[in-house]
Amino acid sequence: MTMAGTGSEAGHRLAGPLADVAADAGWREHPPRVGFFTDTSVCIGCKACEVACKEWNAVPEDGLALTGMSFDNSVGLGADTWRHVAFVERPNPAAPPAAPGGTDGPAGPEGRAEPRWLMSSDVCKHCTHAGCLDVCPTGALFRTEYGTVVVQQDVCNGCGYCVPACPYGVIDQREGDGRAFKCTLCYDRLGDGLEPACAKACPTDSIQFGPLEELRARAAERVRRLHEAGTHQARLYGHDPDDGVGGDGAFFLLLDEPEVYGLPPDPVVPTRDLPAMWRHAGLAALTMLGGIALAFAAGRRQP
């Protein structure tokens, strides 16, 4: 695997479909792009992925206190939470109509409503167009030969530009440290031919790792089978190369709207509009200079 130069030399783009992200980043020879397909329909909320991620990557503990958010003690992704298992309680759509005085789901013990559990293991999306990478001034964030996005902590200066640039709110600065941290898709394991720790630990294959194109085909087939079985709410999220980030390297099969899982419904990489912004800024500057020149010329004509 060799580098062809910088991303700009390889014709780096800020938005739209991109067939080969590694080549765009300057990798002349590289393996196929890899990623995650998370099938939330078989997630059991065991948190094995969270534990495996922390153990392998030496990620600090992120709080063991009760949060009041069901069984969710880690709340969301951050510098010390690279995998987050969400527990979402929802009314059961297959339940019979609510009885007078009303419950949302089938009756449980003592007549209480039984909710539908939605569980999902969230992670960095390793976007095709990664805003965090675009705005990093030191090169601490880089695109690997596998198409993933990694932070080099020894290069990060803690500026924090990457944090607001992520449309998913994934990357974060570690408290008391200042540097940015996030999932690396176990870059060190990939180099040895191993799958990421979270996927290795998942007992139900909810987290699947492999070449991205193979995962997309597998996901489409899974959705088709779920629809045939009557689970019509099943849908894919982050798989579309025509979306606002050019498609994700980590995408999901969901059983409800993205917002239910805490995911943005229409994520867009913030740097997508930079060319248009610079054009408008340049036009404004030229207009202002033209006005100054006219005013100067008019002033010189005065007696």
Image (cartoon, rainbow, N blue to C red):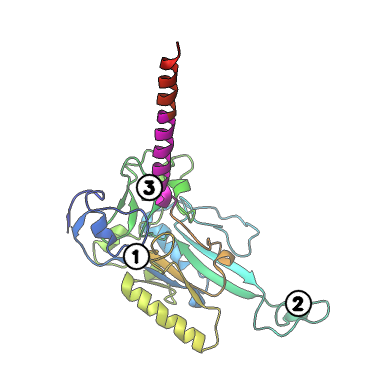
Relative to 173, does residue 297 appear above or below in the rendering? above
- Given the current orientation, which residue lies at the most extreme right position? 100
Reading the chain from its start, which is encountered first: label 3 or label 2? Answer: 2
- Given the current orientation, which residue lies at the most extreme top position? 303
Place of residue 302 in the rendered image (x, y in percent of width and height, measured from the top left) = 45, 14
188 sits left or right of 287 in the view: left
Place of residue 291 in the rendered image (x, y in percent of width and height, measured from the top left) = 44, 28
Relative to 63, does residue 210 appear above or below in the rendering? below
Between the residue at mark 1 and the residue at mark 3, the CA separation in whole angstroms equals 36 Å
Reading the chain from its start, which is encountered first: label 1 or label 3? Answer: 1
Q: Which mark is residue 103?
A: 2
Q: How many marks do you count on the picture?
A: 3
Which residue is at 46% across, 81% downward?
223
Between the residue at mark 3 and the residue at mark 2, the CA separation in whole angstroms equals 52 Å
Which residue is at 69% across, 78% downward?
114
The residue at which mark 1 appears reads as 196
- The quarter of the picture where the C terminus appears is top left
Place of residue 270 in the rendered image (x, y in percent of width and height, measured from the top left) = 44, 50
Most foreground residue, 122 or 109: 122
Of discs 3 and 2, which sits in the foreground? Answer: 3
Report whether residue 76 is seen. Answer: yes
Tell me if residue 210 is in the magenta stretch: no
Q: Secondary structure at mark 1?
A: loop
Most foreground residue, 137 or 193: 137
The residue at which mark 3 appears reads as 275
Q: Main secondary structure of the magenta part?
A: helix
Place of residue 221 in the rendered image (x, y in percent of width and height, measured from the top left) = 41, 82
Reading the chain from its start, which is encountered first: label 2 or label 1? Answer: 2
Whether label 1 touches label 3, CB < 8 Å:
no
- Residue range (magenta): 270-290
Whether label 3 touches label 2, CB < 8 Å:
no
